[in-house]
Image (spheres, rainbow, N blue to C red):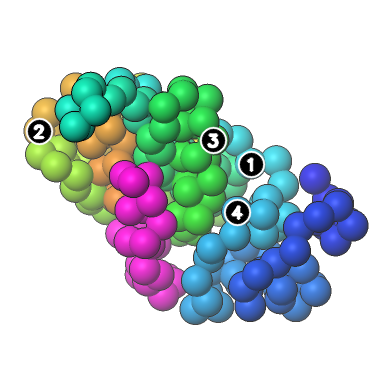
Amino acid sequence: MSANDYNDGGWQPVTRLGRMVQEGEIDDMETALNSGLPLKEPELVDQLLPGLEDEVLDINMVQRMTDSGRRVKFRCVVAVGNRDGFIGYAEGRDDQVGSAIQKAIGIAKLNMIKVPRGSGSWEDRSDRPHSLTRRTTGKAGSVEVEVIPAPEGLGLAASDTVRAVLELAGIENAWTKSHGNTRTTVNLAKATFNALENASQSRQPRRNRGEEREVADQ
């Protein structure tokens, strides 16, 4: 969808950042993230990052007892990225699988970060941004994931879940280490995203995503 589609087709921004994007004052995602303004509209992410890919990493049925009986919801874990330095992650819950996926995708766009890519391995002299610039670690529950820059040509030494997140972020070469209950996909995916987020904090202001992430649990 192009910028004209948004201007003519119905997206009416309700936030200052959204209006700045629609009016052309901000025309790239990195500037939007560095603006210090909260990211609350998925549509502006679609406009600044056309061609975003999404991947469902896990779908799980969650049951809860209420006064009216047993209530079943589906929890979906989703990552979105452009394979060129931008990645978002979220969980979404709903009575229907499709709705849970769409909810998670929308929240993941609001959790978008810019991953600092480069050639952080001492074994590599490539000028192409294909790995991380430095080692980073992320945690979620009992799971800890460490991502280590690797030379070009190595590929991704990672499990399927970790690999999926790194590929969406545009990381092509890296060593990884995982500890804890790594069979829990949701924690493994979240720990990987948290590792990339921790790496990004060294180059951009931290934004408060607590509000957006809590939406997934409602």
Indicate the secondary structure of the residue bearing disc 3.
Answer: helix
Estimate the spatial distance between the alpha carbons at disc 4 and disc 2, rounded to whole Å.
33 Å
Q: Is residue 196 left or right of residue 47?
A: left
Q: Earlier in the sequence, mark 2 or mark 3?
A: 3
Q: Which numbered marker is on residue 105?
A: none
Residue 72, placed above or below residue 207: above
Is residue 214 covered in magenta?
A: yes
Which portion, as a residue range, is magenta? 197-218
Disc 2 designates what residue? 180
Is residue 38 covered in magenta?
A: no
Q: Is label 1 or label 3 in front?
A: 3
Q: Which numbered marker is on residue 42?
A: 4
Q: Which numbered marker is on residue 102?
A: 3
Q: Earlier in the sequence, mark 1 or mark 3?
A: 1
Estimate the spatial distance between the alpha carbons at disc 2 and disc 3, rounded to whole Å.
30 Å
Q: Position of residue 7 (x, y in %)?
A: 85, 61
Q: Earlier in the sequence, mark 3 or mark 4?
A: 4
Q: In percent of the image, x 89 and y 57: which residue is there?
A: 8
Q: Is residue 68 visible?
A: yes
Q: Earlier in the sequence, mark 4 or mark 2?
A: 4
Q: Which is more toward the observer, 114 or 11?
A: 11
Q: Amino acid at mark 4?
A: Pro
Q: Is label 2 or label 3 in front?
A: 3
Q: Which is more toward the observer, 132 or 140?
A: 140
